[in-house]
Image (cartoon, rainbow, N blue to C red):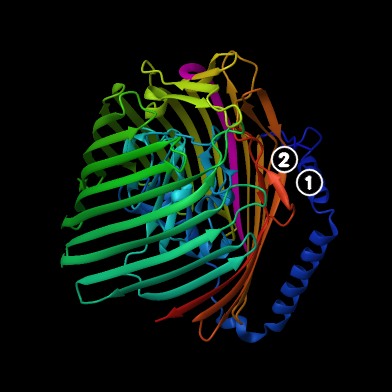
């Protein structure tokens, strides 16, 4: 069953049509007795907790909606600004959101963000994108941790299963939907994710967390963060995670990792931050549905130094250098990859004449890849980039943001990424934004230089199954994006954000069957142009001091130009409903509904479709001993024991239900 709601009128027979369809979805997915029982129990617990509260609520802090909507961000313009001042569509996931989500994998956090597409491809492998174009290794969205890119140039995407950060370390995640190339350069066509960790200068914390649940899921984390002297602060986090995955599938995971961060304040106006981390993991993986299962070993490490200096009150200089390394090896030696990256970045922001806020800078980056699947065994890419942006206050309530970035890389040469945005404020809490921007994506090493022959497993060992050959003549993908955004607080109590977008994409890089007979030969080319358009609506409603209701709806359409066919990995409709309850006795409950429409995917035998699904997640928690101890119980995917989210060369993987308990100790 698919949901069919027209994106603008919502219903041909009136606004009630959308409500009717929503009810149909809920009835279809909640018809199981177990789910009905869970919902009744949740309702009973909420009523009991609410009735137990009496005059305690007079000291209970009201939910500050304006503070929620005006949180400070840094990713949109590379300097601190309010969310309402951003030239992009931005959603912020706070540390409280992370805790109360019950998520154990970072990609699951993005399911509740409007416009975001998240699929569990296989076991611990995820794909994340914004506004369509989601694939196993979608390369159109830049992902960073503290401004350090974790984008893998070989595959052109992110290995989320080898994530280099703990959930307990995260201060907030800034999710930009739409192009961010003017600030961040190539491969930010669909958006930017910047995961920002806690500054030990601002976060004094001693924490131990233990989680255990179904699928033999076990995880332990310890975190130490404190100010050792007036000028020196440090945080250290370590942990180990393992799970057996889904029964009958080779998708287990064993992940030990550790991270560290130090802050040294040279003077009141000058500070140095040092970041480091190491991750070694082992996991089960299937490369294609026709090849044998294999165990893979992944290892990554990084070191980063950042110096920030305030010249005067409105002038800041920033210098950053990082080195990162990751390797990927399969135990059957089918695939061996090593990638090393060096990056040097500087930027300067200042105010001119009280009306212009200017930021400019540049970066040098060198990437080297070694693999048994690369022609010549090794390849490298050297990149130079320069950017400038000016935020011009034309009138008291009208701001123009204009900028451009120039980049030159070894694969495709030079390119420019301009952006212009107009922001108009009707009142302090009512803004409209109009943006036009250009962005581009460079081909990955695999798309350009890969050379492999995949052979059959026993008893047909040695017989070729399929081959892949890179195309060094591939050009960059380009996108021109138009956005209209509106943000307000209605009646002082309802936060509303509406985003409309229309994107034109040219020269999309896609794989195709170059030899449509046995053995198959796969290659890549700039084969298609496409149009992506859609709408995102998000609402925050603090119903009482203890009850926050959030909901969002996304409509998206991605179609090829001159071809009457939808693009893969782009479900038309999605909606989320989150109900958050926080009581004065330390008890809290979070209920989340996540709906995704049916979607189409490519396979070696043609196009296939995955059905729509409705996911229910519930978290209940109790804090004790002045919040030093927290006990929580989480259920994920409660509506279905299993459901598929995608279909690719691995086949149709069934996402399993997870139920786990957690104990968290905090010592301060």
For label 1, the residue is 25
The residue sitting at 39% across, 37% down in the picture is 336
Tell me the quadrant of the picture where the N terminus can be found: top right
Nearest the eye: 519 or 77: 519
Q: Are marks 2 and 1 in contact (CB under 8 Å)?
A: yes
The image quarter containing residue 337 is: top left
In space, the residues marked 2 and 1 are separated at their CA atoms by 10 Å
Mark 2, other Cα within 10 Å: few <14 / some 14–19 / many ≥20:
many
- Identify residue for label 2: 612
**Local SS, label 1:** helix
466 in relation to 165, above or below: above
User: Going 81% across and 61% down the picture, which residue do you hit?
Assistant: 34
Which of the two discs, 2 and 1, labels the residue nearer the N terminus?
1
Q: Nearer the viewer, mark 2 or mark 1?
A: 2
Relative horizontal placement of residue 438, taking residue 544 as reference (left or right): left
Left-right relation of 663 to 298: right
Q: Label 1: how many residues lie within 10 Å, few (<14), some (14-19) or many (20+)?
A: some
Q: Is residue 300 above or below residue 220?
A: above
Mark count: 2
Q: Quadrant of the C terminus?
A: bottom left
Examine the image and state in which quarter residue 546 appears: bottom right
Residue 384 in the image: x percent, y percent?
22, 32
Q: Main secondary structure of the magenta part?
A: strand
């Amino acid at each position: 069953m698919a949901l069919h709601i027209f994106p603008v009128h919502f219903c041909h027979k009136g606004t009630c049509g959308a409500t009717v369809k929503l009810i149909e979805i809920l009835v279809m997915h909640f018809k199981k007795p177990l789910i009905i029982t869970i919902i009744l129990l949740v309702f009973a617990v909420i009523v009991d907790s609410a009735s137990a509260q009496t005059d305690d609520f007079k000291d209970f802090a009201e939910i500050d909606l304006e503070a929620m909507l005006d949180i400070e961000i840094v990713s949109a313009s590379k300097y601190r600004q309010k969310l309402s001042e951003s030239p992009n569509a931005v959603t912020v996931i706070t540390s409280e959101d992370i805790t109360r989500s019950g998520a154990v994998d970072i990609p699951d956090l993005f399911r509740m963000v409007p416009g975001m597409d998240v699929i569990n491809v296989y076991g611990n492998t995820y794909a994340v994108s914004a506004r369509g174009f989601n694939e196993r290794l979608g390369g159109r969205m830049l992902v960073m941790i503290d401004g350090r890119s974790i984008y893998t140039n070989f595959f052109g995407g992110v290995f989320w299963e080898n994530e280099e950060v703990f959930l307990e370390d995260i201060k907030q995640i800034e999710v930009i939907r739409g192009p961010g190339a003017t600030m961040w350069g190539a491969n930010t066509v669909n958006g930017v994710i910047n995961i920002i960790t806690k500054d030990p200068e601002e976060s004094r914390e001693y924490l131990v967390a233990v989680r255990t649940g179904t699928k033999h899921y076990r995880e332990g984390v310890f975190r130490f963060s404190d100010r050792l002297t007036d000028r020196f602060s440090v945080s250290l986090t370590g942990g180990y995670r393992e799970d057996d995955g889904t029964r009958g599938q080779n998708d287990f995971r064993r992940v030990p990792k550790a991270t560290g961060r130090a802050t040294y304040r040279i003077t009141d106006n000058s500070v140095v931050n040092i970041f480091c981390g190491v991750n070694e993991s082992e996991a089960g993986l299937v490369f294609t549905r026709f090849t044998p299962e294999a165990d893979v070993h992944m290892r990554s490490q990084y070191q980063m130094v950042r110096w920030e200096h305030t010249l005067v009150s409105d002038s800041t200089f920033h210098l950053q250098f990082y080195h990162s390394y990751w390797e990927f090896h399969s135990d059957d030696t089918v695939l061996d990859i090593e990638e090393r990256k060096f990056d040097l970045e500087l930027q300067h922001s200042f105010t001119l004449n009280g009306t212009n806020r200017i930021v400019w800078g540049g970066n040098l980056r060198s990437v080297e890849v070694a693999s048994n699947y690369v022609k010549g065994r090794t390849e490298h890419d050297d990149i130079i980039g320069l950017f400038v942006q000016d935020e011009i206050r034309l009138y008291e309530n009208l701001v123009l943001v204009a900028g451009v970035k120039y980049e030159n890389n070894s694969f495709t040469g030079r390119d420019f990424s301009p952006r212009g945005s107009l922001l108009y404020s009707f009142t302090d809490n009512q803004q409209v934004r109009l943006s036009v921007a250009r962005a581009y994506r460079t081909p990955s090493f695999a798309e350009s230089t890969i050379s492999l022959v995949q052979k059959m497993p026993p008893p047909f060992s040695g017989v070729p199954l399929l081959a892949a050959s890179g195309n060094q003549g591939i050009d960059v993908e380009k996108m021109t994006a138009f956005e209209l955004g509106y943000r307000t607080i209605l009646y002082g109590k309802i936060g509303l954000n509406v985003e409309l977008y229309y994107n034109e994409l040219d020269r999309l890089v896609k794989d195709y069957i170059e030899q449509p007979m046995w053995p198959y030969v796969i290659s890549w080319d700039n084969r298609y142009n496409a149009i992506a358009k859609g709408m995102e609506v998000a609402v925050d409603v603090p119903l009482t001091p203890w009850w926050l209701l959030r909901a969002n709806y996304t409509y998206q359409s991605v179609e090829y130009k001159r071809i009457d066919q939808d693009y893969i990995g782009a479900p038309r409709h999605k909606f989320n409903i989150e109900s958050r309850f926080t009581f004065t006795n330390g008890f809290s409950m979070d209920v989340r509904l996540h709906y995704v429409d049916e979607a189409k995917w490519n396979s070696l035998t043609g196009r296939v479709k995955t059905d729509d699904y409705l996911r229910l997640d519930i978290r209940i928690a109790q804090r004790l001993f002045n919040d030093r101890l927290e006990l929580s119980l989480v259920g994920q995917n409660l509506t279905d024991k299993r459901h598929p989210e995608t279909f690719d060369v691995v086949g149709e993987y069934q996402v399993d239900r997870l139920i786990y308990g957690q104990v968290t100790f905090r010592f301060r």
